[in-house]
Amino acid sequence: MADRCLLYYITDRSQFRGDERVRRRDLLAKVAEAVRARVDYIQLREKDLSTRELEMLAREVVAMVRENSSLTRLLINSRTDVALAAGADGVHLRADDVGPCEARQAAHRPLTTDQFLVAASCHSKEDVIRSDSEGADFAVFAPVFEKNNAPERQPTGLDALHEACRAKIPVLALGGVTMENAAACLEAGAAGVAGIRLFQENKIEDVVRALRAL
C-alpha cells in the first residue's frame, strides 16, 4: 500500500447544473476547494472548449492554484500547447495522444526536470510499461471498476491494477473509484486514486481526510 494516497481531481463542468456561466463558476469554486484541501493534482478536462476558451479558462485556474497553494499541480488534458501557454504544471496524455517523449520535446523539457509533468492514461499493464519507458511521470489506470455512466466499458478489475502497479512509475486508479473501494485500490498497489464524481459530488476536504487516513 502507498505511504500516502495521491489524489487526482479531474474536472467536468458539464456535471454541474445551470447554464455555462453557472457551470464555470461552480467549476472554479470546486477547483478552489480542491486546492485548499491540498489535492495533489488537478486535471483540467473540458474537452468541448475551443483552444482559445480552454486557454482562457486554464489561465484563470492556474492563477487560482498559484495564489492558494504551492503543493497542488495543475495538468491540462491532452493539450501540451495550452498547458505551456497557460503556465500549467504539465499535461495529461490520452491513450491516442502523442507519447510522453514527444510531449516533453514539444515542451522543450528533458526527462530530468521536474518542472513539467507528463501523466498518461493507461488501460493495461503493457500501456503502463510503455508510458514508463517513454518518460511519463505517472500513469492513470482505468477503468478499474464499472462506471454507472459507462456500463458498456468493461472494468479491468483489481488484479489487472495490481499487475500494472508493478511498473516503476506511480499508478493511480481511475474509474468507479469511491470512498468505499479506494482502500482496495491502494492494497492492490496503486499510489493513489483519481476521479471526477469522487470529488465533484462530495466535500473534497472530507474525501482528502478519509483517503489520506487509509
Image (cartoon, rainbow, N blue to C red):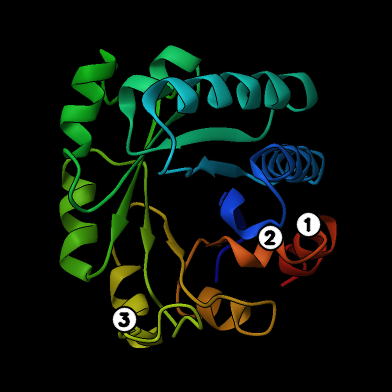
| Quarter of the figure with the C terminus | bottom right
The residue beneath circle 2 is: 199
Cα distance between the residues tagged 2 and 3: 21 Å
The Cα–Cα distance between marks 1 and 3, rounded to whole angstroms, is 27 Å
> Nearer the N terminus, badge 1 or badge 2?
2
Q: Nearer the viewer, residue 17 or 28?
A: 17
Amino acid on which disc 3 is placed: Arg
Q: Amino acid at mark 2?
A: Phe
Measure the alpha-carbon separation of dots 1 and 2. 6 Å
Q: Secondary structure at mark 3?
A: loop
Are discs 1 and 2 less than 8 Å apart at CB? yes
In this rendering, which labeled residue sits more in front, label 2 or label 3?
3
Sequence-earlier tag: 2 or 3 = 3
Q: Residues within 10 Å of mark 1 (few under 14, many from 20)?
A: many
Residue closest to the eye, 164 or 12 = 12
Give the image quarter of residue 1: bottom right
Q: Earlier in the sequence, mark 1 or mark 3?
A: 3
